[in-house]
Image: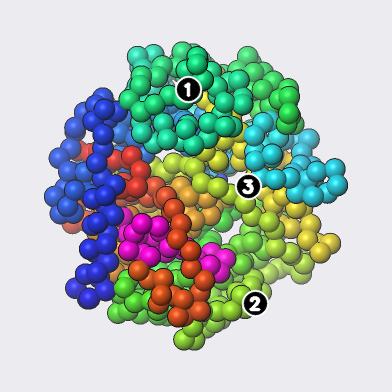
Amino acid sequence: MSRGAAAIRAMIAAAAIAAATVSPAWAQQASDLVAPEQAFGTGTARSATATRQIVVAAHPLAADAGLEILRAGGSAADAVVAVQTVLGLVEPQSSGLGGGAFLVWYDAASRTLTTFDARETAPAQATPDLFRDDAGKPLPFFDAVVGGRSVGVPGVPRLLETIHRRYGQRPWPSLFAPALNLAEQGFKVSPRLAASIAEDAGRLDGQPSTRAYFFHADRTPLTAGETLRSPDYAQTLRALASTGAAAFYQGPLAARIVDAVRSHPANPGLLSASDLEAYRVKERPALCAPYRGYDVCGMGPPSSGATAIGQILGMLQPFDLAALGPDDPTSWRLIGDATRLAFADRERYLADSDFVSIPKGLLDPSYLASRSSLLRRPTAIGKDEATAGEPPWDKAELRRDGMPLDLPSTSHFVIVDAAGNVASMTSSIENAFGARLMVGGFLLNNQLTDFSFSPVADGTNVANRVEPGKRPRSSMSPTIVLKDGRPAFALGSPGGSNIIPYVTATLVGLIDWGMSLPEAVAMPHLVNRFGVYDLEAGTSAEDMAGDLEALGYAVSGKDLNSGLHGTAWVDGSIVGAADPRREGIARGD
Ligand code: GLU
């Protein structure tokens, strides 16, 4: 093991140990199904090794629910329904029925990959000015988020139905039982949920629906370990279980969603009953990029995830990162500047490809080779040079950079069933607690704020401007990595646009630095999207500050709360690992 690898292993272990303890007060209902792997200190509390089937999710109750379905003979698609409906209850701030998702699916029988785009859509009445004030100025972020304006048509309920119809093995109503039981019997509020409520109390307390659910009658917020029940959510689940997704997109529940959005007193939105009725999940081909003998596959547009990850890895390919190791600042100069170049392209070119044309050559090997040559220098790329490139394109369109704003929430989970099918899904209501509006026991998303607030720059349209029926650009990066056509790794993370560097660094850890999956997801974060090098506060990533400054970067300590959840196929076993920074866990047989 190199000096660098030894040092980073020590810092990974320290980070994992600090964050690993699951409080028995709230996790007590999660039965201890799998003995944790012993190879990684106390950090292994969040990992598991399986030979048959496995679930890795952001909450033990969600992982248990998925495993219960798998044990009953369910497929990974069946388990997705159970995991997502439980997450929407126990981790409501991150994802749920009121949000959207991207799913990458590996079909074991045909050995093929496909993806499902269940991203929220803008209402038919939306205009490019949705997030500008009367004077044409972009709204302050939270003025746009809280209320009805930011709510896009949710995609999750239709996605659950779509994949169950295609890949399901168990009866649809049975998949709702775990969430229904928990909604009726109650579950213990987790420390993370309690902390999120306390942190956002000022906004949640201002909206009657969230005040009623997340606070006591005396307006004090719920605390960790308290039991929470949701009769409203139970009612929604019963309707979905008996009628299917139509119970969400039509009828009384749809009417309540439309009413909550349109009649919001301070910030009404434009969502209508016909928008809900028209919602469709889109199946799209997986977007794959080669990296050192692997195929790294994920979501194409409207997500920027797989394109940006493929670009970064493509630019890194000519450099011997394995020899440099994770402790050499040069590794981070290369990774950081490749990320900046990919983000410059992302900002200019990436958006919903059903609405705007996107250069066909963003992953073209010769284009990436020319971008990569910009990294052949001793110090950081200057700000003026870290700009969008000119990839091969069928069009001759002008593009200007948009105005990105996304703050992290979201949840990633991975499920492998006994037949070998793999679901890698990132699911989101965008900001923590979304639009802060609750209907039917779930929160409505604020995903429309992932559009550029300014539709034009210097008189030219930006690709990611609001348009009716369009899907906002995402950074979500559900990923499945293939080796010789078979799954080698499946992973993803929350984190807004930091998702892209989180997932990329994890892949470099796995492929170049020989880390195990639990080590790779616990690796301290060093992230550079726009020039400043963000170093994960309170970890030994901060020890790299002086070296990175010497290379020409400004550095800043930051809370970099990923939630990397994944699986790795190792010697006939499946290793599952959950990020020690959050409450997730892997459970398998
Ligand atoms: N809205 C973000 C996106 O779609 C995800 C938010 C997050 O991960 O926290 O890219």
Query: Is there CB contact under 8 Å for labels 1 and 3?
Result: no
The amino acid sitting under disc 2 is: Asp
The amino acid sitting under disc 3 is: Asp
The amino acid sitting under disc 1 is: Thr
Query: Is there CB contact under 8 Å for labels 2 and 3?
Result: no
- Disc 3 beta carbon < 8 A from ligand 1? yes
Which residue is denoted by mark 3 in the rendering?
Answer: 450
Which label was assigned to residue 384? 2
In the rendered structure, does residue 533 fall within the stretch colored magenta? yes
Task: Kindly report which numbered mark, 1 or 2, lies closer to the viewer in this rendering.
Answer: 1
* First in residue order: circle 2 vs circle 3: 2
Tell me: 153 left or right of 320: right
Tell me: 575 left or right of 116: left
Q: Where is residue 444 in the image (x, y as percent from the top left)?
A: 58, 30
Residue count near mark 1 (Cα–Cα under 10 Å), binned few <14, some 14–19, many ≥20 = few
Q: Position of residue 190 (x, y in %)?
A: 35, 31
Q: Which residue is drawn at 42% across and 35% down?
A: 195
Q: In which quarter of the image is the C terminus?
A: top left
Q: Residue at x 22, y 76 (%)?
A: 2
Which residue is denoted by mark 1 in the rendering?
Answer: 220
* First in residue order: circle 1 vs circle 2: 1
CA distance for labels 1 and 3: 31 Å
Q: Which residue is drawn at 68% across and 31% down?
A: 148
Q: Residue at x 52, y 35 (%)?
A: 200
Give the residues drawn in magenta, as a range.
Answer: 522-542
* First in residue order: circle 1 vs circle 3: 1
Q: In which quarter of the image is residue 520?
A: bottom left
